[in-house]
Image (cartoon, rainbow, N blue to C red):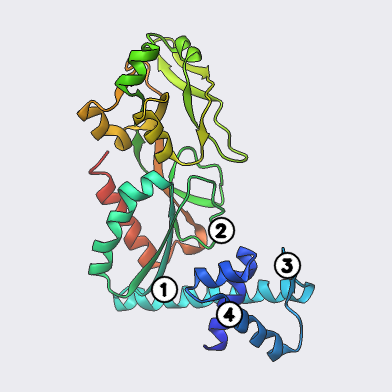
Amino acid sequence: MSYLESLRVFVRVVELGSITAGGRDLRLSPAVASNRIKDLENRFGVRLLNRTTRKLTPTEIGRAFYDHARRVIDTLDEAEAMVSSFSGKPQGVIRLTAPLGLGRRLIAPLIPPFCDANPGVDFRLRLSDRNVNIVEDAIDLAFFLGEPADSALKWRKIADAPRVLVASPEYLAEHGTPRKPEELADHNCLLLRYPRSPEYFWVLQTDQGQQKMMINGRYDTDDGDVLRSWALGGHGIANRPLYEVSEDLASGRLIKILPEAPPLPAQFGCLTPHRRLQDPKVRMFADFAVRELKKIF
């Protein structure tokens, strides 16, 4: 492995806080990744990382070295992007992230046809319903439902994604069907929650305008697909994107609740770090994805 590749290993290990995670991100075993770090330390005769059984952190010189190494890699990536823009043949890795359900249903199917048309491009798709630090995790393109808050990122809107309240026929037969938003307080609402981003209310569109409904429920999870499965199992009322439950509604497995007062739609779009905007392969995939996804919404 070249010196430059060892730099990449070191940078990802620092950013992910783990030799195992950094190696995995670059498709290397922990042993190989550890050896790359040792090679750098032997080369310079300094310790770059402090290692304990629980934590890995850069030393003072390691932090300074990381800052320079990160700039070297960014400059190289920009140079490769410039060359590929002239050659017309995109090369390299695109790192994507998306929420779990959205990523499985809408984003993952887009990758094989794009790769078939662009054999020089590889993908790293990471799916999570938790907040992802796009800059620290070196993400090229993040698909996103909701309101983007980080002004350091470029937001490209794809569509408004309608949301619906749903429950199974079995749940409604046992617990009754809410006829007005206030009656949601008497039901088991299935909640999407994760650390530092709790969902304690739903905002519904009513004849009187937007109405914030405080809700309660015995179940919460950080996985939207689990919410859908709980709703299908008759355990409560879920607030889900329409694309996620459209087949369930058509088949009758789920019933739409309060259709006259639906939840606010979620903005659906993609976020790109400014330093990645000129990368042609990222721009090409973003254009391709937006074009295909607009056919759905």
Circle 1 sits on which residue?
81
Mark 4: amino acid: Ala
Q: Which numbered dot is residue 135?
A: 2
Task: Please say if the residues under marks 2 and 1 sit with CB atoms less than 8 Å apart.
Answer: no
Q: CA distance from mark 3 to mark 1?
A: 39 Å
Mark 1: amino acid: Ala
Circle 4 sits on which residue?
31
Mark 3: amino acid: Thr
Is 168 situated left or right of 147 in this image?
left
Q: CA distance from mark 4 to mark 2?
A: 27 Å
Using a 10 Å C-alpha cutoff, classify the residue at mark 4 as few (fewer than 14 neighbours), some (14 to 19) or many (20 or more).
few
Residue 264 appears in the picture as rendered = no
Using a 10 Å C-alpha cutoff, classify the residue at mark 3 as few (fewer than 14 neighbours), some (14 to 19) or many (20 or more).
few
Q: Secondary structure at mark 1?
A: helix
Residue 248 appears in the picture as rendered = yes
Circle 3 sits on which residue?
53
In the image, residue 106 sits, relative to residue 122, either above or below, namely above
At a point 56% along the width and 76% down the height, the residue shown is: 8
Mark sitting earlier along the chain (4/2): 4
